[in-house]
Amino acid sequence: MRTARTLYRDAALADARSDRLQHGLSVLVEDGAIRWIRPSDDEADPGPAESLEIVDASGATIVPGMVDAHSHVTLPGGAHWIDRIDDSPEVLLDVAERNGRLLTAAGVRWARDVGAPRVADPVDGRIRALSLGVRERWAARAGTPHLRVAGTWLDRAGTLPPAAHTVESHDADELLANALVQLDEGADLLKLYLDGPDAAVSPWAADEIGPVVAAAHARGIKVTAHSGRLNGAIEGVRGGVDAIEHGFELDEAVAGEMAARGTFLISTLAVMRSWASFGSTTTLPRFASDEGRGRIAERRARAEESLRIAHRPGVRIAAGTDFGGGSLRANQLAWEVEALVGAGLEPWEALAATTWRGGELLGEPAAGSIEEGGPADFFLVHGDPLSDPAVLWRVWRVAWAD
């Protein structure tokens, strides 16, 4: 059997471990794995010329395959993203396939899906979060993104619209029971929704969240929490969740607690940028009216300040787009890197949030990393993402999809 080999010659490398590019490197890939990384002027023998493709990568930068740590692969996004949640399962599975292609072409190798409608899957007939079946089918197909799936949203009754097909709970006992069902149905992680119907109070207290976390941890499963408000973040962190999604209203006290506990923050700042863009591309009042524009600007400023508050004590930051379940699209993770830099992170830190920090969050050491012996999960761009994150839009070649 002939071995597939590709030699990427004379590239730069941005591994997001520092603010410096490595220059003049060659990478040999054999059957999807990195055989070696060497200086281009001191390459090891790549083997026989037969079946060897040599790629002139001069002028390009190799970047680890990115991790979209907050995504919704069965949903399309856009200005009407809320309306699209109730599209038919057949339509949503088609959306997932398109999203998979968009992710790959944009250099995103891993997607952490944090909520999908719980409906009957048209392919396997099972009633569970629709993204679970997508995960299983993609795992059997080369070139598709790797998925980690949270199942559906675990929310308090009256929070999300019925069209979202969530798993609602009325009390703490029901919350725990519903969480266990999600685990039994095959969720890789659990997603608590900690913005409740009453904006002034978290829908669940720390002592109600704790048993869910304990049950998940007993099975080796992590728990994350949607929190756009400070009250939910406080209760979630005290309750022991492993990550806070969005974190748009953090303060110094909760950030210090997150740093001490090792709780991740999953940033989705580009959501606010997309809303601002809708002010000129739609006539929807929530985006285009003076009131809507002002409200978005205020939320963006508060969210960016929350990111800085979390960064100062060393909270670990991974990043996502919230595509599908929010307004972004599946190929726009570069927008989040730009948003993180705009909020004050160094470009290498922002790239780290979408690469190896995402791997840490997933518990997958190879995710978002490049090393000899590891998978050839990298892509090539023109430009230096460690000085200008906008170059991440200029994807030239994706190694795992060659």
Image (spheres, rainbow, N blue to C red):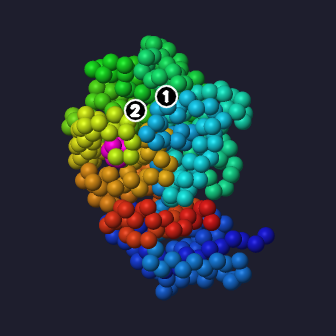
Q: Measuring 38% from the left and 26% from the top, which residue is drawn there?
A: 194
Residue 76 position in % (x across, y down): 52, 41
- Residue at which label 2 appears: 226
- Helix, strand or loop at label 1? It is loop
Q: Which residues are magenta?
A: 271-279
Compute the Cα span from label 1 to label 2.
9 Å
Camera-nearest residue between 395 and 46: 395
Whether 276 is among the magenta residues is yes
Indicate left or right for 39 with 92 as reference: left
Q: Amino acid at mark 2?
A: His
Q: Amino acid at mark 1?
A: Trp
Residue 226 drawn above or below residue 389: above
Graded by Cα atoms within 10 Å as few (under 14), some (14 to 19) or many (20 or more), the crowding at tag 2 reads many
Residue 35 position in % (x across, y down): 59, 71
Total count of labels: 2
Q: Earlier in the sequence, mark 1 or mark 2?
A: 1
Graded by Cα atoms within 10 Å as few (under 14), some (14 to 19) or many (20 or more), the crowding at tag 1 reads many
Contact between labelled residues 2 and 1, with CB atoms less than 8 Å apart: yes
Whether 278 is among the magenta residues is yes
Camera-nearest residue between 336 and 202: 336
Residue at the far left: name it: 252
Residue 167 drawn above or below residue 13: above
Q: Measuring 67% from the left and 78% from the top, which residue is drawn there?
A: 52
- Residue at which label 1 appears: 153
Residue 244 drawn above or below residue 375: above
Residue 364 seen: no
